[in-house]
Amino acid sequence: MTCELLEELKAIGVEVIPQGENLAIRPASKVPPELKERLRAHKAEVLAVLKARPATCAATCYEIEPGRWVHRPWDGCTTIPKPKAATISKADCAHCSCTGECPCPACNLRRTGKPAPCLMCQSEKRQVWLAATRPEHEATAWTQ
């Protein structure tokens, strides 16, 4: 309910800003009376949502569980989520049995019958291999 109310206000060009235990509404003249009443009725909830939201978030960003947010950059959110760390190391790779090279079609892209750098645990070597073995017709397509 609270997120819907904030989205309705944003849609008509109204910004809601928490100021202590009050809400600043800019411009207040755009808010229809029925929305003002709903805002008053849900003031505590709106304050809690706005205070919990990072300052770099848009009004439409929301928390799905403690510490996990859905960010909406198309609405102006500039929060950049931290990338997750890679979970596969060479020592744990079940794809190539920890050899670093794999003969499967996913790794060698059927460019060669020989093993290629494993796409799961050798991503940097794989990028170099991909560039070096790029078929000629692909190379000319990019230069046209």
Image: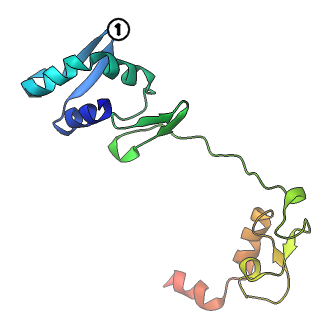
Residue at image coords 20%, 39%: 11
Q: Is residue 38 visible?
A: yes
Per the image, label 1 sits on a secondary structure element best described as loop
Which of the two residues, 105 or 40, is positioned nearer the viewer here?
40
Which of the two residues, 32 or 58, is positioned nearer the viewer here?
32
Whole-percent x and y of residue 87? 76, 51
Residue at image coords 18%, 34%: 13
Q: Is residue 27 visible?
A: no
Figure quadrant of residue 12: top left
Residue at image coords 75%, 77%: 107
Instruction: Give the tally of numbered discs.
Output: 1
Colouring chosen for the image of the structure: rainbow
Which of the two residues, 69 or 58, is positioned nearer the viewer here?
69
Q: Judge the density around disc 1: few (<14), some (14-19), many (≥20) Cα neighbours within 10 Å.
A: few
Q: Please indicate whether residue 139 sits to the left or right of residue 114 in the image.
A: left
Whole-percent x and y of residue 111? 73, 88
Quadrant location, the N terminus: top left
Q: Please indicate whether residue 83 sits to the left or right of residue 144 in the image.
A: right
Which residue position holds label 1? 20
Residue at image coords 37%, 23%: 50
Figure quadrant of residue 98: bottom right
Figure quadrant of residue 131: bottom right
Q: Amino acid at mark 1?
A: Gly
Whole-percent x and y of residue 129? 76, 75
Whole-percent x and y of residue 33? 7, 24
